[in-house]
Amino acid sequence: ISHTVTYPTQLDLAPYCMVATHPHSQCPQSVPDHLHAEGRDLSTAHCWYDLYAVIVHLGSAYGGHYVAYVRKQVLPVVNQDPEATDTDAQEARYEWYYASDTMVRRADEQEALSAEAYMLFYTKSPDHGY
């Protein structure tokens, strides 16, 4: 089966996430803070996940080869100017890489998003969430 499916770079999984509506103090310490709705408007809550890897299978059901597209964060350049403000700070950027056995090369996001994905990996977004 060979079929191209479009997939987003961000997923909002809020409709599928359980959020505790009771006070955080009533839960064991092992329960993460982001699972509590205390003081939050649940009707506008989001639980964002960012795409960070696309696995592609090349070949058939009887054999083949796997390759991957992986997104890596590029740390922002720190502004050394003592008069710089917070608005001068650069936001984090991301770069995509293609990996196949012993070869790794840069790839653009469109190449990763247009690949025939066998498996997608998402990670909890640090910028959004409950």
Image: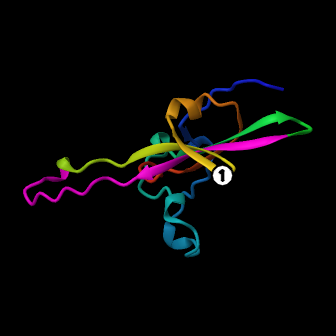
Q: Which residue is mark 1?
A: 102
Give the vertical position of 17 relative to 24 (above or below): above
Residue in front for this viewpoint, 73 or 12: 73
User: Which quadrant would residue 67 be assigned to in this image?
Assistant: top right
Residue positioned most to the top: 3
The residue under the point 78% across, 42% down is 65
Range of magenta residues = 64-86
Residue positioned most to the left: 83
Give the vertical position of 29 relative to 66 (above or below): below
Left or right of 24 in this view: 17: right
Expressed as whole percent of the image width and height from the top left, the position of residue 93 reads: 38, 45
The amino acid at mark 1 is: Thr
Residue in front for this viewpoint, 66 or 49: 66
Expressed as whole percent of the image width and height from the top left, the position of residue 116 reads: 69, 30
User: Which quadrant would residue 8 be assigned to in this image?
Assistant: top right
Assess whether residue 71 is covered by the magenta stretch.
Answer: yes
**Dot 1, how many residues are within 10 Å of its Cα: few (below 14), some (14-19), or many (20+)?**
few
Left or right of 56 in this view: 46: left
The residue under the point 31% across, 53% down is 76
The residue under the point 70% across, 24% down is 4
The residue under the point 49% across, 50% down is 72
Give the vertical position of 27 relative to 87 (above or below): below
Expressed as whole percent of the image width and height from the top left, the position of residue 68 reads: 65, 44
Left or right of 15 in this view: 65: right
